[in-house]
Amino acid sequence: SADGSAVTPVKTLLEYAEERGLSTGVVTNMAIWDATPAACYAHVAARSSKDEIFRQLLAPRFGNGVDILIGKGLADANASFAKLGTTPAIAFAEAGYRFGGDPAAVTRDTRRAAVLRDEDFAAIPAVEGAIASLSRNGKGYFLMVEWDMHTDDPQKGLRHAVEMDDLVRRVSAIAGEDTLILFVADHSF
C-alpha cells in the first residue's frame, strides 16, 4: 500500500471454490491474462503485468488452481515463458496440465487442461467440454465464461452477440437444476 503496510489480496471467487474442493474453469475468447479471466486467479494491479499473471496462474494460493483453462494469448504466453527459459507447454505440463491449442480436446475424461491459442474458436463446444470435465466433481464446480463483444467491426460484434445468446441457451439446457447460472454484462454489453 501507499503507506508501506502489507496488503492482503482479496480472495477471488475461483479461490473460494478451490478452497472448498470444487473443480474450476475459465473459458474466454480473450487473452487469459486479460482483466476478467485474470481476476479469477491473479492479484495484480494491471492487466499489462502478463508475466506476473502467468506466474500466479501456475502458483495458486488455494487448491491446485484453475482446472480447465481455454482462451487466447498463446503468443503472449510464449513471450512470457521465454523470459524464464521455458515454453508454455513445458510450464503447464510441469503444473499437471495437458497443454494444447484445440478446445475440442477438453472432454469429460479431461482432468486438467490448458488450451491456449491466438485464433477464434467456437464457444459452445469449448464450454460444453469444460462443463463435462468439471461436472464430474461431486462437490460441484465454478466456471467463468467470458465471451467478449468489444469491437469496432459491426459484423464481428453481432456474431459474438449471437454466439453469447446461443451459449446462454445451451448452458441453461445442460447445467443441472442445482446449478446457479449468472449472466452478467460488461457495461453495455
Image (cartoon, rainbow, N blue to C red):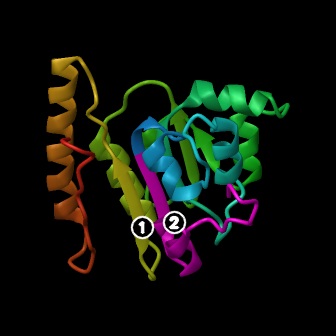
Foreground pick, 140 / 50: 50
- The structure residue drawn at horizontal position 64% and vertical position 71%, both measured from the top left corner, is 62
Q: Which of marks 1 and 2 is nearer the N terminus?
A: 2
Residue type (three-letter) at the residue carrying disc 2? Thr
SS category of the residue bearing label 2: loop
Q: Is residue 110 left or right of residue 127?
A: right
Could you tell me how far apart the alpha carbons at marks 1 and 2 are, in whole angstroms? Answer: 12 Å
Q: Does the magenta stretch include residue 21?
A: yes
Task: Determine which residue is flagged by label 1.
Answer: 142
The image position of residue 132, as x and y in percent, is 38, 61
Quadrant where the image shows the N terminus: bottom right
Foreground pick, 50 / 71: 50
Quadrant where the image shows the C terminus: top left
- The structure residue drawn at horizontal position 68% and vertical position 67%, both measured from the top left corner, is 61
Q: Nearer the viewer, mark 1 or mark 2?
A: 2
The image position of residue 156, as x and y in percent, is 22, 22
- The structure residue drawn at horizontal position 68% and vertical position 27%, both measured from the top left corner, is 78
Q: Give the range drawn in magenta.
A: 1-27
Q: Residue furthest right?
A: 85
Q: Is residue 7 left or right of residue 127?
A: right
Task: Determine which residue is flagged by label 2.
Answer: 12
